[in-house]
Amino acid sequence: MKINGDATIIGGGPIGSSTAASLAQKGYDVTVVEQKKEIGVPLKCAGLVSKRVFDLVNIDAETVTQNKLYGAYIHSPKGKTVLIKNDKPRAFAIDRVLFDKSLAEVAKKNGAVYLMNTTLDEIEKGNGFLKTRVKHGNENTFISSKILIGADGARSKVRKMFNLPEPQEMLLGIGAEVENIDVEPQYVHVFLGKKIAPGFFAWIIPTEKNKARIGLGSTQPLPKPVKTLFNDLFNYPTTKNYLQHAVITNITAGNIPLGIINETVKDNVMIVGDAAAQVKPISGGGLYTGLLSSKHCSEVAAEALEENKPTFDTLKKYHELWTKDIKREISFGMKIRKRFIHMNDNEIEHYFTYLEDETIISIISQYGDIDYPSRLLFPIIKNSPKLLHLLPKMMHLLL
Ligand SMILES: Cc1cc2nc3c(=O)[nH]c(=O)nc-3n(C[C@H](O)[C@H](O)[C@H](O)COP(=O)(O)OP(=O)(O)OC[C@H]3O[C@@H](n4cnc5c(N)ncnc54)[C@H](O)[C@@H]3O)c2cc1C
């Protein structure tokens, strides 16, 4: 089979579909190539997002929202706990499978064509276009288009094929859906500790009464087998109370790419979403940052198609735009991470004591923002004289 079009998007995840929806809405012929049989399945996400995510997509927030979350219990490695909460919802647990499906429906309604159960195989360069060979079983399809967009996730093949830089770090996220769990439905739980979640944290995100998504992140190579890392999550003194009676209904794992990629376009090629490591390093969340970047990706791709100039010189504007929006926050997150991954549990415990301060808790409750954690720095330092000595270090993190 042969297809001629304006843009080929590899990956029908949320970022590929959002990019496809915008380009198709502008009247361009878009083909989305997705290796899965069913959009969004299997689930590889904890589905925690801010309200901003809903502002970036054309779907009804209420239909995909499972739960509204008003704050978080943070647990130290040795069992201290603080609650940071607000009167207004600070985050939303979404049905990620439905979210992905809804975004794909919008793209299809706008005219994008989806080739499901189909995998990227080879790409050949033509004169001003790319010829992409994709495989559905033994069947080959050749798609000729002026622009190829790699929205093919953390281990992007497009990124590799075009020699674009790899992410600085690849975390492993291991998650599960559980029932029969005893937590207040309005608060997330975050567990710190090198044994529980090496170089990251573990979470419980209630989705409805007695149900939650739980999980942990770890640096790679893993310090112990993935199964052991996950099974142990149920047995730590800090997690046991909440998880000992949990019944697991679904387990999943996925890579989380971190760190700024300094090159995300080539002639006729763009990468976006996890493929471009557009992920927040402190939380591992990639939906907001990926969707925000997807807007720039589709706008610049449309401009290049309009001018019939899909060259590096035209497409590099996309790289400039997304880095302008989120590079600072990602760099800040990576600097925090660099320190965090080298901390042992005693050091984490030491820094945790700063959290046990009424003023600091109230500032975090007021200014805490899961998309822009750096915005907390100055209010905290300004309002806590005992932290004033940290100001030079903090300045360094922001520059
Ligand atoms: C355990 C875990 C928990 C997470 N929790 C959160 C969270 O709470 N909040 C949040 O914001 N983010 C979270 N994330 C991150 C979030 O899931 C990603 O940032 C998001 O899925 C990125 O979307 P994407 O479309 O770029 O990539 P993906 O969702 O990975 O989609 C890429 C698509 O490309 C397809 N594909 C890949 N290769 C090919 C190929 N060669 N040919 C054809 N198709 C291909 C894949 O099948 C997939 O459908 C989590 C991640 C993990 C692993």
Image (cartoon, grey):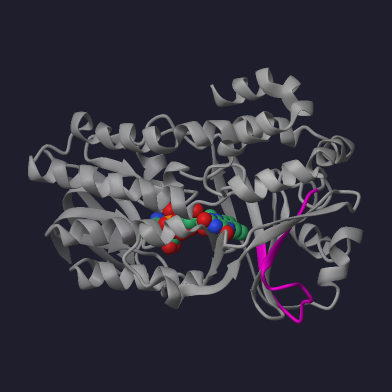
Which residue is pictured at 72% across the width and 30% down the height?
339
Q: In x, y percent, where is residue 114?
A: 27, 68
Which residue is pictured at 39% across the width and 53% down the height?
291
Which residue is pictured at 32% across the width and 31% down the height?
320
Q: Is residue 392 left or right of residue 287?
A: right
Does residue 112 show up magenta in the picture? no
Q: In x, y percent, where is residue 351?
A: 81, 36
Image height of 289 relative to 57, above or below: above
Image height of 249 relative to 224, above or below: below
Tell which residue pokes out farthest to the left in this image.
307
Q: Is residue 183 left or right of residue 135?
A: right
Which residue is pictured at 14% across the width and 57% down the height?
26
Residues rendered magenta in the picture = 175-192
Q: How many marks?
A: 0
Query: Quarter of the image holding residue 387?
Result: top right
Q: In x, y percent, where is residue 295?
A: 30, 49
Does residue 188 show up magenta in the picture? yes
**Residue 301 visible in image:** yes
Tell which residue pokes out farthest to the top in this image.
392
Q: In x, y percent, where is residue 1?
A: 17, 66
- Foreground: 265 or 287? 287
Image height of 370 relative to 378, above or below: below
Classify the position of the C terminus by image quarter.
top right
**Residue 163 visible in image:** no
Q: Is residue 151 left or right of residue 29?
A: right
